[in-house]
Every structure is written in structure tokens, then in C-alpha cells.
Amino acid sequence: MREQAPMLCVIWSEDLADRVAGLVRAHPVLAPRLLYAPRRAVHAYAIALYEAPIVDGGESEAELAARLASTHPRALLAEAMPGCSARLYAILDRCGETVRPAIFYQRLHALLLSDLALVVLDAPDIDDHVLDFAEMLGGMNSVVLHARRALHHSPIRAHALQDLLDLLADHGIAAADLADRLSERGGAKALARAVRRLIDRLPLPHPGLAAPAGFRLTTTVGELRAVGRRFGNCLAGVAGRYDTGWLEAVRGQRVYVVRDDPPVVACLRRASEGRWWVEQVSAHANESLSVEARRGLERDLAEAGVRLLHGDPHRALWSLIDLPRTSDGDEADDDEVDDDVDLAA
């Protein structure tokens, strides 16, 4: 059970400190209630004070003191926040030993009356970060709320899951498919497995080229990862720092051409519409192909109608920029302004 011992000292907010001091001086009977009551009671008194401002014609301080002295904190809470959740008083114990600003209690009250109440009730300690997280989930897919425990109440992980759900939805894969695979009490590993299974269903767009004889094109992320597992290379992963090939393939920027026997996988990168270059070719376990075997593959690709560059266009540009100086006559135009120079500098 949560500790129930009375607090020896309460730090009241700047908005209430002077008022509490004045009430205790004028009505010493309130000292045990306002200074040494259990956490939930002190927070309830704070809410009652926030909701009982000093106004002309309103409740006098003497009347307020009498009401605080004679009314149970739970009843004061119900008066200050009509219609509040029956669970509000109990969970005030989790709000710490410091009285919060009025807006904190108002946000907590609203969340407990919404579909997001479970986010708050899950938290062992309730602070602004918990309320921020709960309110953030209100604008996200309900599956993110469903997976909140697996996300460890992390806004970064919640946004990450929402982003992946949006990507899947763009390809016709519904978020409900993830909810069906995930128990509400499932952990982070279960969530990761469920997301990977849906990622495996992502289709790879047809690149508009034909595979050479004996080769095939991969058509889904799952098929691409299966090739990686069979070949023992990084294509099997989706979440490592360098495992971005699947996403490039989904965007149509990379194409993987596969031969099963003998095993060969070639990665083609898109240079422009209808033009590619061979970024990497390997056999089993990333074993490099011989120069002759690679050239043979490039010939097969060309014969299949694939328009190939000799290499990476960025490297091609760099090879020209990094040309060695030869003779003065060859550098006659070096005095011309370089396009890369900032003329406004």
C-alpha cells in the first residue's frame, strides 16, 4: 500500500501560501488540516481554496475557515469540482507533497472524466509529464493509447508508433491489425514484434524494370527480410542503425534483384526516372563477387533493358572536383569564379 503517514511539512504554491498562513493564524484549529493532513487531503484543501476566491459579497474568510474545519476533504473536493471522478480523491496521493497550481488539478479532473483516464491511473506518480502524455495521446490513433504500457509512457516512443501507423495506413494496412495482435498488457518486445509483422506486409513498388533471367525482384518488405535471413546479411533487420534498405525500397529508391542458386543479391539505386546504378552485389554472408561475376550481372541487367550508370552520381561529381592539378596550361580557367563560392559573402 502507498504510504499514508501525514506530511510534516507542505510546500504551498505562491498563489496560496499567504492565504493559508493567514487562515492558520486566524483559526489555529485549521493547522492540523492544512499542514499535517495526508497528501490527498492537503491537495483536496488546495483545490477547495483555489475554487473559493476572495470576492466582494462572497464567502468570508471566517465562513471558509468554518467550512474547512467541519467538512471532510472528499466532500470539499466534490463541492469544488462538481461531477468529478470518484477516483480523483484517491489518486491525489500520487500528486506529490507539493501543492500544484490550479491548472494542474483542472487538467487532472478533465482527464479522469475522459477516455484517457487509464493513462493517468496507470502512473505511479502523477505530474505534468504524465498529464502532457495523456493529453498528447488524445490526438493520436487509439492503438497508441492501447499500447501505452509497452511505450513506457514515453512521448518519443508514442510519436514513433504513430508515425509507423501513418506509414502503414498509407499502404492500406489498418492500425486495427496491430491492436488485434497486441494485448493491452503486452510489453515492449511484444509491441516490436507486432509492428515488424505489419512492416513485413508493406509492398515494394514495381520499379518498371525486368529482372534478368534466373533472378527475381522482391515484392514486399517481408520477402526482402527473408532474403536477408537466408543470405545471412543486414537485409534481415529493420530497426538497426544502418537497416534502412527496407524503407528506401518501400519508397522505390532501391530495388533488390535476387538469385537463389547460386545465391546473389544486387541492390540497385535509382538515379533518375528509369536510370539506376548498382550500389552493391554480394553472395552469401556478404561475400563479394568477383569482378567478372559483377560485370556479368551488369551485362545481364543491361540485356534485360535496365539503363545503368557506371556508379554513384555523387562519387562521379566528386571525382571531377578532386582532379589533380597537372600543368599550368591545363588550369588556365582556374581564375574564373567557382560556382560553389558564396558571392554574397
Image (tube, grey):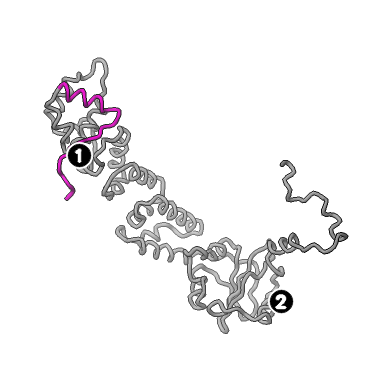
Residue designated by label 2? 303
**Relative to 334, is 277 on the left or the right?**
left
As drawn, the residue found furthest toward the top would be: 57
Q: Earlier in the sequence, mark 1 or mark 2?
A: 1
Residue designated by label 1? 40
**Residue 257: horizontal and vertical position, in percent?**
60, 74
Residue 91 appears in the figure: yes
**Residue 187: horizontal and vertical position, in percent?**
33, 61
Q: Of discs 1 and 2, which sits in the foreground?
A: 1
Mark 1: few/some/many CA within 10 Å (<14, 14-19, 20+): many
As drawn, the residue found furthest toward the bottom would be: 262
Q: Quadrant of residue 8?
A: top left
Q: Which three-letter amino acid code belongs to the residue tagged 1? A: Arg
Q: Nearer the viewer, residue 219 or 248?
A: 248
**Relative to 187, is 199 on the left or the right?**
right
- Whether 3 is among the magenta residues is yes
Vertical relation: 36 (above or below) 249: above
User: Which residues, given as a range, are shown in magenta?
Assistant: 1-26
Q: Nearer the viewer, residue 63 or 270?
A: 63
Which residue is drawn at the image coordinates 36% and 59% (left, top)? Answer: 179
Vertical relation: 30 (above or below) 330: above
Which residue is drawn at the image coordinates 32% and 34% (left, top)? Answer: 103
Q: Which three-letter amino acid code belongs to the residue tagged 2? A: Glu
- Whether 60 is among the magenta residues is no
**Residue 76: horizontal and vertical position, in percent?**
18, 31
**Residue 225: horizontal and vertical position, in percent?**
49, 71
How far is the residue under mark 1 from the one under mark 2? 78 Å
Q: How many numbered marks does the figure carry?
A: 2
Which residue is drawn at the image coordinates 26% and 28% (left, top)? Answer: 16
**Contact between labelled residues 2 and 1, with CB atoms less than 8 Å apart:** no
Vertical relation: 323 (above or below) 103: below
